[in-house]
Image: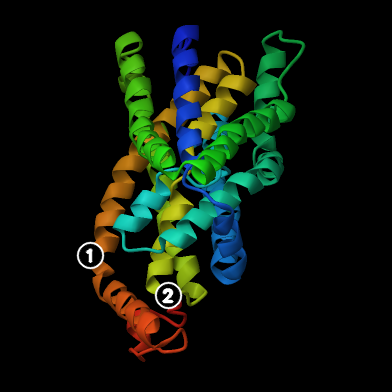
Amino acid sequence: MEITQQLLNPVEQGLLAVMILIIMFGMGATLTPDDFRHALRQPRGMLIGFLSQFGLMPLIAVGLAVLLNLPPALAIALIMVGCLPGGTTSNMFAYFARGSVALSVSMTAASTVLALVMMPLLLDLHASGFVERIDSEMRAAGDEGGFAMPYPNIIIALLLVLLPVGAGMVLLRHSPEWAKTAEDTAGFMAIIVILFLLGSAAVRHGNLFLETPWQVYAGSICLGLVGFLFGYLMAGAARLAPRFKRTVSLETGIQNGPIAFTIILLSFREPLQSQMLWQAILYSTFIVITSSLVTLFYRRIGRADWEIHRNNTVHQRLFGEGYRIRYPEAAVGRTPQD
């Protein structure tokens, strides 16, 4: 598909940039150095999360792009979303799904930092074929410059995103009350960003929704759904406790859409920019819907093992860390630690 007009004008891009800064600042306001130390104390869960985030998701994105025969620009955008770190809303969904919020926050923090290295490497590995197709098409159309993946711009965009995250961490250290306000604002702003982008597209490009092929919608929806499934299965194969499986599943499928918007706006030019941005917008829209449905399902099936976990936590506070009631392994998994 081709988008003949610029999806967002300069004013809309400026507003989007401000909203993304607020979201990432709010994300930082939820993180402390203890979150990173917790990640080191839970190496198995973090390792499975890392393999799911940066191993499974890019492969799923590539598989969907090839299976659905997406145009090169949209394929690159889908792969880029698959290579992103965990989303800012995954911690909230992990909480409502009766998962491990500590593991979710640790995975989000670690993946956001690791994305500086992993994302350029994964894009070079998985998207090179689509880049070559765009380059060939542009040269055939008379563009002597052709096309190359703007890796320096992508790295700069990732660094710019990390700056408000660091500022949010500083705020949390010095003013927890204001940090809580920033956290709540960020969660609300994430929804506003999606509504803003969809509203802008509907007002100025209303026909875009009808002209978008079903394959693009399918890729946007299935990336998250398949990520949830394989993240859960991978955590299950590692014999993690049920609530850890739910957490890894959600962290795998929920990618950080605002980072995708930032990278696309700062790294690509028209007409590729609007096409890639549209793919990222559709993913961000559908991931909120699918995450909500999956969370409701996880919350229902996780009631028993969550109650067991809470009981063990209370008993350990009363009788010491070593005290544990032995429940059936099927109910708590092999590693029912905190």
x and y percentages locating residue 241 in the rendered image? 42, 75
Circle 2: residue type: Ala
x and y percentages locating residue 4 in the rendered image? 47, 9
Front-most of residues 307 and 84: 307
- Any part of residue 79 in sight: no
The residue lying at 52 percent from left, 25 percent from top is 276
x and y percentages locating residue 30 in the rendered image? 46, 46
The residue lying at 41 percent from left, 49 percent from top is 90
Reply above or below: 163 against 45: above
Reply above or below: 93 against 188: below
Element type where label 2 sits in the image: loop
Circle 1: residue type: Arg
x and y percentages locating residue 140 in the rendered image? 70, 14
- Callout count: 2
Q: Which residue is mark 2?
A: 241
Reply above or below: 238 against 83: below
Q: Which residue is mark 1?
A: 300
Return the disc, 2 or 1, that comes first in the chain's sequence.
2
Front-most of residues 134 and 156: 156
